[in-house]
Image: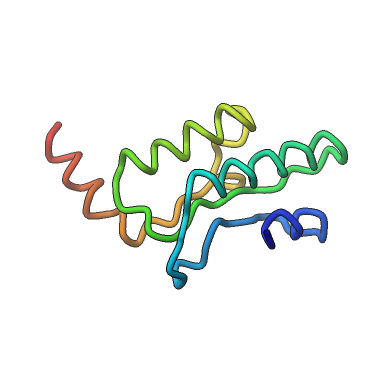
Amino acid sequence: MRGVQSVYRGSDFIKTSTGKEKVNATYEAAYVMCHAIKQFYSATGKKVGFKAAGGIRSTLEALGYQAMVNEILGAEWLKPNLFRIGASSLLDDIIKQLDKI
């Protein structure tokens, strides 16, 4: 997995997908990447960011990635400099959910 390798090659951020593949963001890939980031941080003290991207279309799915990052990496990773979600397909659902409030 290139994202995991890139952590050890000096990347400041890794992401699940470019959004141009058949298989985009998956919870399984995010799980592996978050654990690689955690292991790297434990070994080096350097924080690497994570971006869930590619095919995330629902607010519920986005919240799943947020919960995973919180559980594995901790609340300190839930900041824009360390956690992002590719949201080009997500905006419509966020607006829909806000209209329910």
Give the residue displayed 47% in from the left and 50% down from the top.
26
Residue 8, image x and y in percent? 82, 55
Q: Is residue 31 left or right of residue 9?
A: left
Give the residue displayed 44% in from the left and 57% down from the top.
86
Identify the image quadrant of the N terminus: bottom right
Q: Is residue 49 above or below residue 23?
A: above
Give the residue displayed 47% in from the left and 55% down from the top.
25
Residue 68, image x and y in percent? 52, 34
Q: Is residue 63 left or right of residue 74?
A: left
Give the residue displayed 64% in from the left and 56% down from the top.
14
Q: Is residue 72 above or below residue 36?
A: above
Identity of the residue furthest to the left in this view: 100
Q: Is residue 81 above or below residue 39?
A: below
Identify the image quadrant of the C terminus: top left
Q: Quadrant of residue 4?
A: bottom right
Q: Nearer the viewer, residue 71 or 11?
A: 71
Q: Is residue 15 left or right of residue 61?
A: right
Q: Quadrant of residue 77?
A: top right
Residue 62, image x and y in percent? 39, 43
Q: Nearer the viewer, residue 68 or 83?
A: 68
Identity of the residue furthest to the bottom in this view: 20
Q: Quadrant of residue 5?
A: bottom right
Residue 34, image x and y in percent? 64, 41
